[in-house]
Image: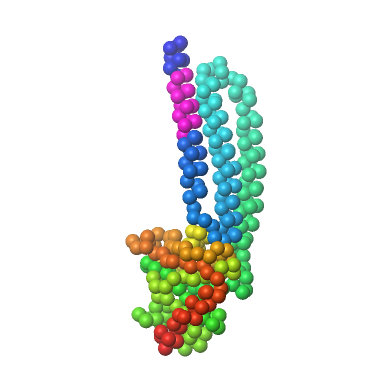
Amino acid sequence: MGSHTVSTTVERRALAVVLVVLVAGLVFFTIRFAGRMPEAISPIGQEIDSLFRFLLTVTGVIVIAAHLYLAAVLWRFGDERAQAPIVRRQWPWVLVPIGLLFLADITFDHKSNKIWGKVFGTPPADAFTVEVTGEQFAWAIRYPGKDGKFGKTDLRNITDDNPLGLDRNDPAGKDDIFFPAGQGELHIPVNRPVLFLIKSKDVLHSFCIPWVRLKMDAVPGMTTKLWFTPSKEGQYEFTCAELCGLGHYKMRGILIVESSDKLEEWLSQQPTAADLIP
Ligand SMILES: [Cu+2]
């Protein structure tokens, strides 16, 4: 029995060491790569980041503690004489983690519900509004123009020069500014709520701005919404976050966050629907 016990003890302890190495690797790669997201350029993005850090820290501590405990047990206890005491002391190791997980879950719910409420709450009435329409494999962009109203669209009106199917008889659409899919940059104002109206011409897409940590499905036949307040000027990228076909990887565009003045000036230089499709 002697030599047999020695070899299982070595195996057990080797397993404990492997476990500790795996946990150390997990911690290393998480710390090394978890911070790799681009800078968050809106308050809601920063809140989502801090929620993720909180979730990762709490669950991380639980995972690390549980595995180190498992490694300690592996290291310490192996033969039958040593098993008896740990069985008697088992209850706290069940009840305490359950209690902690329950508390953590309540906290997670509370924090994430608050952020969910902000993301999906009613956008402010004075939000700057822009429409994005996904199609395989690019985004079309439309601004409501000076009147602040989008003209009606209908799929039956779509032609090569009228890619969004604008209704030529709707006066609200005359001053609309539009860019066919894949053309034009997406300009939005800094420090003002921006509301995106999101549509799709063909299949499911997802309008995504990684710098804000938000995305929203683009669903054929529906208009979905997404809003936030960008707080940092600059040039970023928006993209499709739904595998929508072979060209999905190139379904992205330039996002420019700039002052309201610059944006108004840029908009005033763009041709309107009345110019392009009289
Ligand atoms: Cu797509």
Residue 56, image quadrant: top right
Residue 128, image quadrant: bottom right
Is residue 164 visible in the rendered image? The answer is: yes
47 lies left or right of 252: right
- Quadrant into which the N terminus falls: top left
User: Count of labels shown?
Assistant: 0
Q: Position of residue 192 (x, y in %)?
A: 59, 69
| Main secondary structure found in the magenta portion | helix
The residue lying furthest to the left in this view is: 246
Residue in the picture at 51% in, 78% down: 265
Which of the two residues, 55 or 243, is positioned nearer the viewer here?
55
Residue 41 colored in magenta in the image: no
The image's colour scheme reads rainbow
Which of the two residues, 215 or 224, is positioned nearer the viewer here?
215
Residue in the picture at 45% in, 19% down: 10
Is residue 206 visible in the rendered image? The answer is: no
Residue 16 colored in magenta in the image: yes
Q: Is residue 77 above or below residue 239?
A: above
The residue lying furthest to the top in this view is: 2
Residue in the picture at 51% in, 43% down: 31
Q: Position of residue 163 (x, y in %)?
A: 39, 78
248 lies left or right of 235: left
Which of the two residues, 161 or 177, is positioned nearer the viewer here?
177
Q: Position of residue 275 (x, y in %)?
A: 43, 86
Residue in the picture at 50% in, 64% down: 234
- Quadrant into which the C terminus falls: bottom left
Task: Look at the image and give the residue range highlighted in magenta.
Answer: 9-22
Q: Position of residue 167 (x, y in %)?
A: 45, 84
